[in-house]
C-alpha cells in the first residue's frame, strides 16, 4: 500500500499554479461523447478519477490519447451503451456517463453505482430527472435499463440541488429538440463550466450558476479544444496548508470568485487574503483563532469538499469551533485520526465540536476518504514529529502528486510503500 510520510514543522510558503478541476473535468469528459468530432481537453489533471473516466470512455468505444497534459477524446466509433458492472460499481463518476450516452445513443444500461466512504450516494434525483425527459428506466436487480427512444424536452424539478443530477440532465437534454428547464438546479461553478464547454461545442444552455437552467436542444455539437476551470478544492486545500503551518502562499490560475466561502472562513481565523484577477495570496497569522460555526451547504454555501481540511486547520486554532456537515451523512471519518494526533474533537451526528489545542503530534493514520485524507496530510505538516498517512491512492483520486506540490512549497513529505506489518520500505 502506498502512503505519505510527513515531517511537521515547516511553513508552507511560495507560489504555485493550480490544476484544472477534477469535478469539472469528469462531467466534461463524459459530455465529450455528445459529438462525433475530436474533443481536446487542455491542462487535464493526472488524477486517478480522470484515468478511470478515460478507461470507461474506451470501454464505450471511444478513442482517447494523451499528448502531454492534453487529453483527446474521439467518439465517432461510440457503439457500446452498456457500462460494465465492475466499472459502474467501482467508479462512482460512471454515473455522469448516463446522460450523455442517452443523449447520443438514446439507450443505456448502467449498474447502480455503489455508495462510498462519505455516504450512500443515491441516484434517485438523476433518474427522476431523466424520467421527466421521457426516459423509460426499469430496474433489473441493480441494473438500470434505460430506453430513451421517446425522449423529449421538458421541465425537470430537482427536490435537492444535486450537482450530478443537474449535470446529467444538462447533458441528456443538449441534443433534445425543444427547450428543457431544470428547476432548483445546483449552482456550483463546475456546472457553469459544463455549460461553457457544451456551448463552446455549439450548445445553447443558459442559467448555469442560478437555480433555473434552460437547455435549448440543438441537432449536433462539434469538436473543440477546451481548458476546464481551476480546481477550487485543491486551491482551498493549499490555502489551508499555508494557514495551518503559519506560512504564506500565492496560488496562480485560480478563480477568486470560486473561493469566496473558503476565504471568508480563513479570514475569520485571522488569515490575510489578497485577491487578484487569477490569483489569491494568503498570509497566515502567528496564532489562528477559531471560526465560530462552519455549515456545509450547496453552492454558494461553504463547500462540503473543504470541510475536512478546515477541520484540520481549526484543530490548532485558539477557541472552539463548530462544524455542521449538512450535505453528506458520514463525512467525519477523519475525526478519529485527527484525535489520535492530539486534536480534541467531539462528534454528535452531523455536528463536530473542535476545541483548539496548542499542538498536534505525528503518528500513523489512515486516509478513509479523499478529502479526509488531505486533511490528515495538512495536520501532519503542522504536527510535531513524523506522520505516516496510509492509503495515499485515495488522495491521488483528487490531488495530482500532492507530495510534489507540497514539497515545492517547502513541506517535508514523501510518498512511500508501506508494508502490511506496519513497516516502511
Ligand atoms: C459532486 O458529487 C462532487 N463530485 C462531490 O465531490 C461533491 O462533494 C458534491 O458534488 C457536492 O458538492 C463530482 O462532481 C465528481 P450531489 P455529487 O449529487 O454530484 C444527495 C469530491 O470530494 N443525492 O450534489 O454526487 C447525496 O446523497 C467529491 O471531490 C440524493 O439524495 O453530489 C448528497 O447527500 C465528493 N439523490 C447530496 O445529495 C441523488 O440522486 C449532494 O449530492 C443525488 C444526490
Image (tube, rainbow, N blue to C red):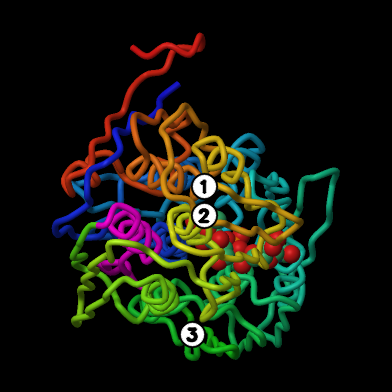
Q: Is residue 322 left or right of residue 78?
A: right
Residue under label 3, please give it: 209
Specify which label sits upstream in the sequence, 3 or 2. Answer: 3
Is residue 234 in the magenta section? yes
Specify which label sits upstream in the sequence, 2 or 1. Answer: 2
Mark identifier at residue 308: 2
Residue in the picture at 31% in, 57% down = 238
- Number of disc labels: 3
| Residue 395 shows in the view | yes
Residue in the picture at 44% in, 44% down = 397
Residue in the picture at 37% in, 66% down = 232
Q: Nearer the viewer, residue 100 or 150?
A: 100
Residue in the picture at 58% in, 79% down = 176
**What crowding class fits label 2: few (fewer than 14 Cα within 10 Å), some (14-19), or many (20 or more)?**
many
Mark identifier at residue 372: 1
What whole-number distance in Å separates the C-alpha atoms at marks 1 and 3? 27 Å
> In the rendered image, which quarter contains the N terminus?
top left
Give the magenta part as a residue range.
222-246
Q: Is residue 149 left or right of residue 45?
A: right
What whole-number distance in Å separates the C-alpha atoms at marks 2 and 1? 5 Å
Contact flag, marks 2 and 1 (Cβ < 8 Å):
yes
Q: Nearer the viewer, residue 9 or 27?
A: 9
Amino acid at each position: 500500500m502506498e502512503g505519505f510520510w510527513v515531517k511537521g514543522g515547516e511553513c508552507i510558503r511560495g507560489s504555485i499554479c493550480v490544476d484544472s478541476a477534477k469535478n469539472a473535468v469528469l462531467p466534461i469528459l463524459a459530455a465529450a461523447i455528445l459529438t462525433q468530432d475530436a474533443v481536446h481537453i487542455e491542462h487535464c489533471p493526472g488524477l486517478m478519477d480522470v484515468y478511470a473516466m478515460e478507461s470507461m470512455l474506451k470501454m464505450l468505444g471511444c478513442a482517447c490519447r494523451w499528448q502531454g497534459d492534453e487529453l483527446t477524446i474521439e467518439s465517432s466509433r461510440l457503439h457500446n451503451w452498456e457500462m460494465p458492472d465492475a466499472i459502474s460499481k467501482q467508479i462512482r463518476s460512471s454515473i455522469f456517463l448516463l446522460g450523455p450516452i442517452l443523449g447520443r445513443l438514446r439507450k443505456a444500461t448502467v449498474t447502480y453505482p455503489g455508495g462510498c466512504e462519505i455516504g450512500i450516494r443515491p441516484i434517485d434525483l438523476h433518474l427522476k430527472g431523466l424520467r421527466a425527459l421521457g426516459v423509460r428506466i426499469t430496474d433489473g436487480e441493480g441494473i438500470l435499463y434505460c430506453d430513451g427512444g421517446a425522449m423529449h424536452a421538458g421541465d425537470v424539478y430537482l427536490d435537492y440541488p444535486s450537482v450530478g443530477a443537474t449535470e446529467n440532465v444538462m447533458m441528456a437534454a443538449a441534443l433534445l429538440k425543444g427547450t428543457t428547464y431544470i428547476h432548483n438546479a445546483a449552482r456550483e461553478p463546475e456546472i457553469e463550466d459544463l455549460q461553457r464547454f457544451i456551448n463552446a461545442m455549439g450548445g445553447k444552455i443558459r442559467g448555469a450558476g442560478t437555480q433555473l437552467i434552460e437547455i435549448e436542444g440543438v441537432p449536433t455539437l462539434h469538436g473543440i479544444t477546451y481548458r476546464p476551470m481551476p480546481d477550487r478544492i485543491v486551491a482551498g486545500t493549499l490555502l489551508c496548508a499555508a494557514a495551518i503551518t503559519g506560512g504564506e502562499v500565492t496560488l496562480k490560475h485560480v478563480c477568486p470568485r470560486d473561493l469566496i466561502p473558503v476565504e471568508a472562513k480563513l479570514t475569520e481565523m485571522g488569515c490575510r487574503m489578497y485577491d487578484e484577477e487569477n490569483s489569491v495570496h494568503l498570509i497566515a497569522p502567528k496564532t489562528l483563532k477559531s471560526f465560530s460555526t462552519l455549515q456545509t451547504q450547496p453552492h454558494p454555501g461553504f463547500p462540503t469538499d473543504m470541510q475536512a481540511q478546515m477541520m484540520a486547520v481549526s484543530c490548532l486554532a485558539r477557541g472552539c469551533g463548530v462544524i455542521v456537515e449538512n450535505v453528506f451523512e458520514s463525512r467525519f471519518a477523519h475525526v478519529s485520526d485527527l484525535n489520535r494526533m492530539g486534536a480534541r474533537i467531539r462528534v454528535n451526528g452531523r455536528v463536530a465540536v473542535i476545541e483548539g489545542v496548542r499542538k498536534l503530534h505525528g503518528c500513523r493514520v489512515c486516509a478513509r476518504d479523499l478529502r479526509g485524507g488531505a486533511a490528515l496530510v495538512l495536520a501532519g505538516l503542522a504536527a510535531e514529529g513524523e506522520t505516516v498517512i496510509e492509503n495515499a491512492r485515495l488522495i491521488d483520486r483528487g490531488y495530482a502528486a500532492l507530495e510534489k506540490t507540497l514539497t515545492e512549497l517547502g513541506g517535508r513529505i514523501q510518498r512511500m510503500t508501506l508494508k502490511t506489518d506496519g513497516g516502511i520500505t
